[in-house]
Amino acid sequence: MKAAFVTPYHLGGRVAPEWVGYRSVGALLAGCFEREGIDLLYTGGYREHGIVWRGARQAVFNLFASQKYLRFAEPAILRGYARQLEQVLAQSDVDCVVSHGWLAVACAELRVPVVIHNDAPLVRLIDYYSYYSGITQATMASIYKAERAAIEKASLVVYASEWAAEGAREAYPSCAEKIRVRPYGPALPQQLLPDDITNILAARSKQKQCELLFFGVDWERKRGPLAVDIVRRLNATGMPARLTVVGCRPPISSDDKQWVEVCGFLDTRTEQGAQHVQAIMNRSHILVLPVLAEAFGLVFSEASAFGIPSFASATGGVATAIRDGVNGRLFSCADGAEEYCAAIKNLMSSGSYEALARSSRRDYEDRLNWQHIGRQWSELLHEHAISTHRRA
């Protein structure tokens, strides 16, 4: 079995921190497919024809106009991507095309089944993520038209959350039957993930303070200031606590530095970065991420792997990554430090922490690990794409 594995980026190489999670998905899924015996033809990172003048037009427009113009869904750009993909496939015999997103396949003329995967459909992200907020009507129309064409063409469309799948079914009801949900696993290297958390939990139980973890690059979208407010309030009300911030270097007041440790972006591909992340995860009691917008959140799978319950907002795809009472707690986006602090105090003082930590680890073992996800993907490809093509 052979599949063309299409990404809008080149796999491998150094990546800016803000794109690590998104680009990790491609490499992690590819690893799943290869473990399931699928031979992959890697292709992607196609050239955008006219990038200089189109990029200049976008920059000038967004500088002076009241609404944003985004060029990536323009038909000329998509046709250029499609021709490059078609040229690659003309030289190889594959059973199907698996595409991260739909940019390369929207205008492509293909003779094999197309499978699209992504964290969410773009129509779901309009006015949800700030990047897609305040865009022009023409941009919205281009996105909708191109995404609809790609999804109608696909044999199978797979999203990371029920929230994403629901949005796609609402936007493209004629395609509802081909839409599936498969969550994502951790983006941390497999060798960092513990085989057993018994010793880790025993060490955590001896710690004199509650160790909270904030893990993210976008400080404002993931509401880092609220996480600081939470640890501040815990200490003020008599519970010793520390917040460790990984992924960014936000400004922290001199008063808050006594209970906030900022580690910045840690590259787990280096031995030093990997060891630092592992030590932080081992000691952390709770992941606190009161996000405003999140399509899924690989960090929730990572926390579960370490037996760390996640406390986060029930927004976007978070409710698929976190099952309330199983691997964490879900809060309203309107909840503030008082609600989070009450839940943290109750968990840590009631003697129920270890049970939730072990339940979080079981959720990783049952649902949020790439081995299990890979088997599910292999079944989907055989049932809905490759076997259908071969029967035809």
Image (cartoon, helix red, strand yellow):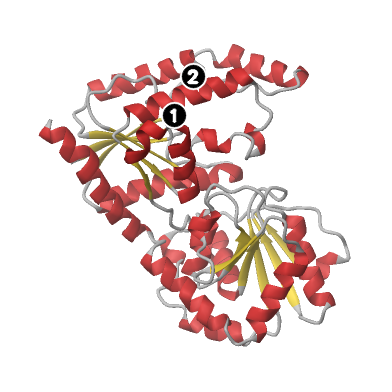
Left or right relative to 390: residue 25: right
Q: Position of residue 252 (x, y in %)?
A: 82, 58
Task: Evaluate whether residue 268 shows in this view.
Answer: no
Q: Is residue 315 above or below residue 2?
A: below
Q: Find numbered disc 1 in the image and state the secondary structure of the residue it sits on.
A: loop
Q: Residue at x 24, y 52 (%)?
A: 36
> What residue is drawn where x is 49% and y is 19%?
48
Provide the residue designation for mark 1: 45
Mark 2: few/some/many CA within 10 Å (<14, 14-19, 20+): some
Where is residue 285 drawn, in percent x and y? 61, 75
Q: Which structural element holds mark 2?
A: loop
- Crowding at mark 1 (Cα within 10 Å: few <14, some 14-19, many 20+): few
Look at label 2 and name its amino acid. Glu
Who's the residue at 88% across and 63% down the image?
Answer: 254
Q: Where, quadrant-wise, is the C terminus in this rendering?
A: top left
In the rendered image, which quarter is residue 204 located in? bottom right
Q: Residue at x 43, y 34 (%)?
A: 101
| Mark 2 → mark 1, Cα distance in angstroms | 9 Å
What residue type is disc 1 on? Gly
Looking at the image, residue 227 sits to the left or right of residue 306; the answer is right
Q: Which residue is mark 2?
A: 48
